[in-house]
Amino acid sequence: MKKFDQRIYLYVALAGILLVVGLAVFYALTPVSKSDSVEYVYIDTDDTQDSVLAKIQPLASTAGMAGLSTLIRHSSYAQNIRTGRYAIEPGNGAVTVFRRLKNGQQTSMSLTIPEVRTMDRMAAYLGQKLMLDSATIIGALTNEETCRMLGYDTCTVSALFVPNTYDVYWNMSIEALLERMQKEHDRFWKGEREQKAAQRQLTPVEVCTLASIVDEETANNGEKPMIAGMYLNRLKEQMPLQADPTIKFALKQFELKRIYQKLLQTESPYNTYVNVGLPPGPIKVASIKGIDAVLNAVDHDYLYMCAKEDFSGTHNFARTYQEHLKNAARYTKALNERGIK
């Protein structure tokens, strides 16, 4: 009888062990995500064990969350939280997700550099996309020493950015971001573009500066090489570029529809009506189309241009000032007829 009782206790204990193991396996292997698509969790520098779990909670199934929570709370994770962007894929069990978080196995992301007009707008954009805050980014982009180390100054640093899409990590530091942008810049320019710039006796920064003006003059990529050619002619003749977009940049009034005579006397190194040559730096992050338009500018003898009166976004070009005045009169008449001020 005693031996029979011992067997019962043994079976009960074994059943208990199997139940615990079974539950552990169930919770460990049950998919964490309740979604059929990949979800992402962003872990920041100020996150704690509890805040990490709170971020995962809305994405997780009940069983998956229970398993992950158990693993996290019964480990040293609280003392080893790693920042980053972590993927929670359909079918990933608690063990897989836990290991990913604990080992810092984050997932990269696509970052598209925008063609913004100012560096504070660049900082605001990047601050929304990356773990970095905008204050840190603009602090670096307006720091003379930081810009100098990269080969720029605070007026030309926008030429660092090439508006492409890059594979990066969400938690990259400001140093890593700037280093990556410099590598991509060098890769973009190396070879044919660098050679074409040298043939035109321009540096990459100067090309970007002129390209930024061309970009602001038209959204018509097909016409950009013509406009670039006109401005290159003016530079050769040592004529002021007289580019309206530089007035808008100087005033930081990008919404202006018309540039009146009084605005042409704006005191600014960016005013290309009173200053000969290129402005101190780009008036936006130059587009690749704009850059290539300068490098492959059309060779012609036009020195003037004016927006077409049909508001097509293209221009009438002229060789002489008299021709230009006629084109300008037609455009002014069209503006007045439409009540554009």
Image: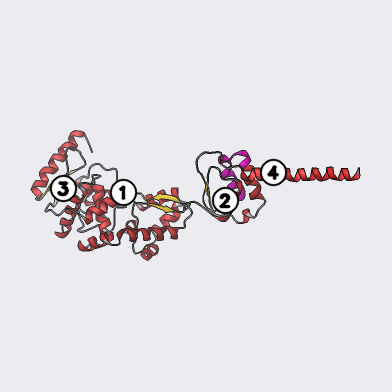
Label number found at residue 252: 1
Q: For mark 1, does the 10 Å Cα neighbourhood hold few (<14), some (14 to 19), or many (20 or more) residues?
A: few
The residue depicted at 58 percent of the width and 48 percent of the height is 52
Q: Main secondary structure of the magenta part?
A: helix
Instruction: Specify whether residue 53 is painted magenta.
Output: yes
322 left or right, relative to 179: left
Depth order, front residue of 286/89? 89
Q: Describe the element under mark 1 as helix, strand or loop.
A: loop
Instruction: Please provide percent x and percent y for residue 282.
Output: 29, 55
Q: Which residue is mark 4?
A: 22
Going from N to C along the chain, the mark reached first, 3 or 1, is 1
Q: Describe the element under mark 3 as helix, strand or loop.
A: strand
Q: Are marks 3 and 1 in contact (CB under 8 Å)?
A: no
Q: Which residue is mark 3?
A: 305
Quarter holding the C terminus is: top left
Going from N to C along the chain, the mark reached first, 1 or 4, is 4
Real-space CA distance between mark 2 and mark 4, rounded to the nearest whole angstrom: 32 Å
Label number found at residue 25: none
Q: Which residues are magenta?
A: 48-64
Q: Nearer the viewer, mark 1 or mark 4?
A: 4
Label tally: 4
**Mark 4: amino acid:** Gly
Real-space CA distance between mark 1 and mark 4, rounded to the nearest whole angstrom: 66 Å
Real-space CA distance between mark 3 and mark 4, rounded to the nearest whole angstrom: 79 Å
Q: Which residue is mark 2?
A: 47
Q: For mark 2, does the 10 Å Cα neighbourhood hold few (<14), some (14 to 19), or many (20 or more) residues?
A: some
Is there any visible trace of residue 11 in the rendered image?
yes
The residue depicted at 17 percent of the width and 44 percent of the height is 315
107 left or right, relative to 192: right
Q: Are marks 3 and 4 in contact (CB under 8 Å)?
A: no
Q: Nearer the viewer, mark 3 or mark 4?
A: 4
**Mark 3: amino acid:** Met
